Image: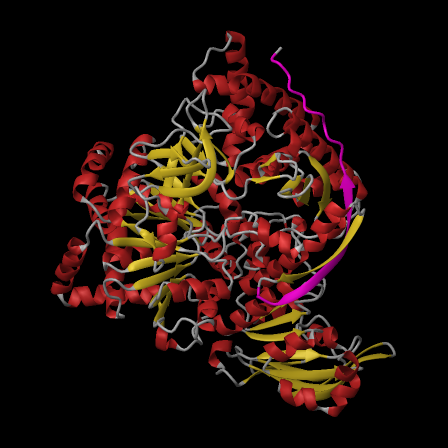
Amino acid sequence: MRAPAASEIAAGEVLLSVENVSLSFGGVHALRDVSFDIRKSEVRAIIGPNGAGKTSMLNVINGFYHPQHGKITFKGKTRDAMRPSEAARGGIARTFQNVALFKGMSALDNIMAGRTLKMKRGFLWQLLRYGPALHEEIENRQRVEEIIDFLEIQAIRKVQVARLPYGLQKRVELGRALAMEPDLLLLDEPMAGMNLEEKEDMSRFIIDVNDHFGTTIALIEHDMGVVMDLSDRVVVLDHGVKIADGTPDEVKKDQAVIDAYLGVAH
Amino acid sequence: MAAEAGAQGHSGAQAQSDTFPKLLVRNARLFANRPALRHKDLGIWQTWSWARLLDEVRAYAVGLNRLGVRRGDSIAIVGANRPKIYASVMAAQTLGAIPVPVYADAVANELAYVLAHAEVKFAAVQDQEQVDKLLSISEQVPNLKTIVYDEPKGLREYDRANLRYIDEVIADGRAAMAADPKIAQWLDGEIAAGKGSDTSIILYTSGTTGQSKGVVLSAKGCINAACDTVAFDKLTDKDEALAYLPIAWVGDHYLNYAQQLIAGFCTACCETSDTAMQDLREIGPTFYFAPPRTFEAMLTRVMIRMEDASFIKRKLFHHFIGVARRHGEKILNGESVPLSGRFAYALGKILVYGPLKNVLGLSRVRVAYTAGEAIGPDLFSFYRSLGMNLKQLYGQTEAFLYVTAQPDGQIYSDTVGPAVPNVDIRIAENGEVLFKSPGQFVGYFKDEAKTREAMTADGYVKTGDAGFFDQKTGHLKIIDRAKDVGKLTDGTLFPPKYIENKLKFFPNIREAVAYGDRHDFVAAMINIDLTAVGSWAERNNVVYGSYQELAAQPLVYDMIAKNVEETNRALAADQTTAGAQIKRFLILHKELDADDGELTRTQKVRRGFIAERYAPLISALYDGSSEAAISTEVTFEDGRKGTMSATLKIRNVATTPPTVEKAA
């Protein structure tokens, strides 16, 4: 009954596929008959002009929106609707276009929050902070510290996130998503509003995550330079319709893409 | 028991151990399980005992030897203060190879120069960033064969042919030693074969005056110099220091390596360079060195936080800081203080000084030093009044750090102390300070001409600094670089650094560059301190988006003008400097930066270079115009370049007539 774990899917095999998905809000068609797949261990970019349906697509993938048509197959299991909590349990983590952290908590606590699903002990045990619950906390803290080390945010470990600059908040958010040890990581504009140096740092972290943990990544990004450098394959949406799909080089040469997007942006 | 052994160890050190590897062997025997190095890994402090350190270094040395490292080879060391970076230095020395530490933040070109000049064959580096940098300059460093690295992150896909993970090198060495007991014997032989006259390390100067030079230091010289100062400050294996300064700087090699190995104390490596202040608090070192700017930044932070504190806390703080200013230093110096003063100070210690020092991580400090730049008298006495034994020293790479140091109880903010034991100081006719010391350098690497230039005929080293012995205290006073002391057109003495330091003592001013040599009057270019002025702007509803915008604010100009006027008043008080008052100044549109070549890697201003780069500003300062346009090239951290242009305002400031007051 159980869906195969991500580890049972070899790198390069299809991890998630989206088939003929359509989503509309009243008369607005956010997505129209979109199909594509994400293969294990790749960096997959979803690009397109404003209002193309990119964020809607991510919301469909992690179960926040329920498409009217089409199906989604994740780790070999097909379903047409699931709750975000199920998606999280299934191994999908994400970051948001507008940072969504617990502003009053420290960077460390925020990333610890990402481990919630890995903690098995109940509320009372954790309240006692004794025996197995303590053991579990130490184990999870260790994982969190590895992420802090990985993202080089040791200096802000105990700083309340509301006091951090935007670029660092984005990094903490990535840390929280990583803490879930996801099979599929969805990044919604990880570099929006960053300066050049922050963008380069973030690009390096995304490559490192993909390289080091073998995490499959689907990202939405506006900076074409970043997209072309980072991703293995790119899917292009325009007005909710898929207009191109392929390697960055193929997409760059595609006339429909140039007309819809690159021709205007560059 | 360990302390006893330690004390015996010192006296014996000079006799038997003439190289650092021999000292390491001695320490592993004497201090065995006492801590040698600490490092924060995944948020938890991990400790390496002396025995473990020796074990790791031996295996590492064998591993390096199997990679081809031989006696006399030079090895570049590039990275932050981490146990395996220090172990790399030790492992290299164990094999009789020569470590060449390089500033980790050096851009690729600077790195290429040093590595090529030192003919390095190997490099031990911290992480991917440094590996990338080395690979990018590999054509300019043809001798470089193998790079070993400490942090594997991001390096998995790299070509492994000439790249090794340090842990693998150590494991390889350990396996080899286990398989063949003769290797351990061979290694003992290598350690014993090291001589005191061998080159222990080559430290490249930061390049305050042009291209950096490789200062060759002998093992015997290093050890003798460090033995003297360990005894001078009574350092033992019970002490603990925090390593956070660049490893390529003589100070770090002296304080956290040479003195550590001789005294047997524990060096704690900061987690990252950004966490140094938190690590300071967690470790609570007993022996602490920081340049004046670190103490200044610490004080600025405290003052800003106190401004935001509640009314009662603020009152309490200011009241007891006042008490400390009146009595603190006297108590520390053992002078007489009225009983009421002692009582108030004791109360302050419980309520303010103790908690404050604890927050800063300075509660356990027994000996603290500052050097490198002049320290503001207010700043200096602030820390001393809290009961911290802060002292000054004067030294340079060519001396293996110490030339002078203040002994306990003889502390003045404007002197650097008398010569340390076994050091001989002489003042040349032109005012230049000359010295002869046990730790003095052998010569500049591959540069006979410069070596000869830096020495007198009778073997004294020219420091290049102008100074004199204070009549009253007998301490040395340093005024400026000998060649920088200039004259105005009317013949008035112009010591630029002296003036710049007076300006920098104001919290709002981060950096200042004074000009006046062969000009009619003194003019200054100023960098504001973004933390202090930014906090002021926030409290006064001054809106700004960047450093450039804040620096151009008329209100900021007003504030800085007041500081300059006050500086003029101070200059007017002394007859020799009264003529060198600042008549005009401007605030620069960007912060001076080492990446742009405006500062050295040790953050000293390069006046000549700045004069060239900002030539239009200098001419505007002297031609009476009220503003000047400037466009400069800036270098980003990744080496790309961009331009920055601005129109800067120039202000005139009032000068004070010379006030040669008689003591009232």
Extreme residue in the top direction: B339
Tally of numbered tags:
0
Give the position of the C terminus of chain B as an image quadrant.
top right
Q: Residue at x 76, y 90 (%)?
A: A256
Q: Residue B210's spot in the image, x, y percent? A: 49, 55
Give the position of the N terminus of chain B as an image quadrant.
top left
- Rendering colour mode: secondary structure
Choose between B150 and B498: the one closer to the eye: B498
Choose between B98 and B330: the one closer to the eye: B98
Choose between B443 and A245: the one closer to the eye: B443
Tell whether position B658 is magenta: yes
Extreme residue in the front direction: B490
The answer to whether residue A95 of the structure is visible from this angle is: no
Q: Is residue B160 left or right of residue B662?
A: left
Tell whether position B26 is magenta: no
Quarter of the figure with residue A37: bottom right
Q: Which residues are magenta?
A: B638-663
Q: Is residue B257 left or right of residue B368?
A: left
Q: Is residue B154 left or right of residue B309?
A: left
Q: Residue A112's spot in the image, x, y percent? A: 55, 55
Q: Residue B258's spot in the image, x, y percent? A: 31, 45
The answer to whether residue A103 of the structure is visible from this angle is: yes
Q: Residue B172's spot in the image, x, y percent? A: 26, 68
Q: Residue at x 56, y 28 (%)?
A: B377
Q: In the image, is residue B426 above or below residue B554? A: above
Q: Residue at x 52, y 77 (%)?
A: A2
